[in-house]
Amino acid sequence: MLRETSRKKEDLDEYIRFWTESNQKRKDRRDHPEQLPPEGKVKAASGAFSQTLDLIVARYSRGDDLVALRDDLPGLLEQREKLLYYCDALPEEKQENRVMYERLSDGAYIEYCRWLTFAACLGADQAHIDRALALIDNPGVDALFDRIAIALGDHERPVADGLLYPKPYAPLFEALDAASVQQGKLIKSFLDGYAKTVKSWGIGIISKGTEPYHPGDWCFEAALVVKLFGIDDSAFRDHPLYPAALVHGDPA
């Protein structure tokens, strides 16, 4: 059963087929020493991680079994480990170039939230989550991300004084400590403003479904906060960007 109803199953099938093949070619080039210079290997490793994540998103949109999606999580860890490996392998004079791949940029922020959402909601073991948080790093940079990491088990993590991206994340952050009667309203406000903001960042949200070959429009951060902080999602469970099946399972 399709979960992302603005997509067509055949479009998602084609997206998954094409990018699975493309990602394998990218990984083959990256892992052969004669194919790419060190900086190219870093770029390819970053791209392979992103595409592996997008393929999981596309499978979620298509309605693939949630247990099967959990089985894809080790691939994410593998690709992110590869990025670290190739960053470490950069020559000394190129080490500064790794910053662009390891900082908490807007695109990385969304990708890492997606990764942690799938891990938390699909029941990844604590070892996977701990390693993911270690690879993501960036403690004390963003208060929302720090609170999420602490809820996932990184209890010694420092908490930043504020938000790295107050737009759109301020309502979601405020919901963490709001009274229960306000939490649903705050997260609904966050969901309503999410697409416009991240589209301006160039992130994969296309609110009117004009592009057929796309993994699907979701705001996984909302599900992550609901799962970790025990928030009642009844006020926004039917929101088109909210991946409710990750929290509640698919309807019978």
Image (cartoon, grey):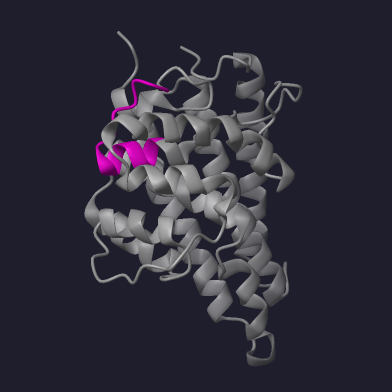
Q: Quadrant of residue 146?
A: bottom left
Residue occupying the point 35% across, 33% down? 182
The residue located at (42%, 29%) in the rendering is 185
In the rendered view, tell whether residue 251 sits above or below residue 26: above
- Report the residue that reaches farthest toward the right: 210
The residue depicted at 51 percent of the width and 73 percent of the height is 85
Numbered circles on residues, count? 0
Q: Is residue 235 magenta?
A: yes
Image height check: is 37 above or below 168? below
Percent of width and height locating residue 12: 61, 23
Q: Position of residue 242 (x, y in %)?
A: 47, 27
Residue 168 position, x and y percent, is 57, 45
Can residue 152 be seen in this snapshot?
no
Tell me where the magenta segment starts and ends, as one range.
223-236
Q: Residue 29 or 111: which is nearer the viewer?
A: 111
Residue 112, given in percent of the width and then of the height, sits at 48, 53
Taking the view exactly as shown, the residue that stands out farthest to the bottom is 92
Q: From the viewer's perspective, is 65 left or right of 82?
A: left
Where, quadrant-wise, is the C terminus in this rendering? top left
Position of residue 229 relative to residue 215, above or below, is below
Which of 44 and 164 lies nearest the eye of the viewer? Answer: 164
In the rendered image, residue 92 lying in the magenta stretch gets the answer no
Query: Who's the residue at 63% across and 46% down the image?
Result: 23
Q: Is residue 117 left or right of residue 2?
A: left
Q: Is residue 116 visible?
A: yes
Most foreground residue, 80 or 172: 172
Residue 145 in the figure: left or right of residue 251: right
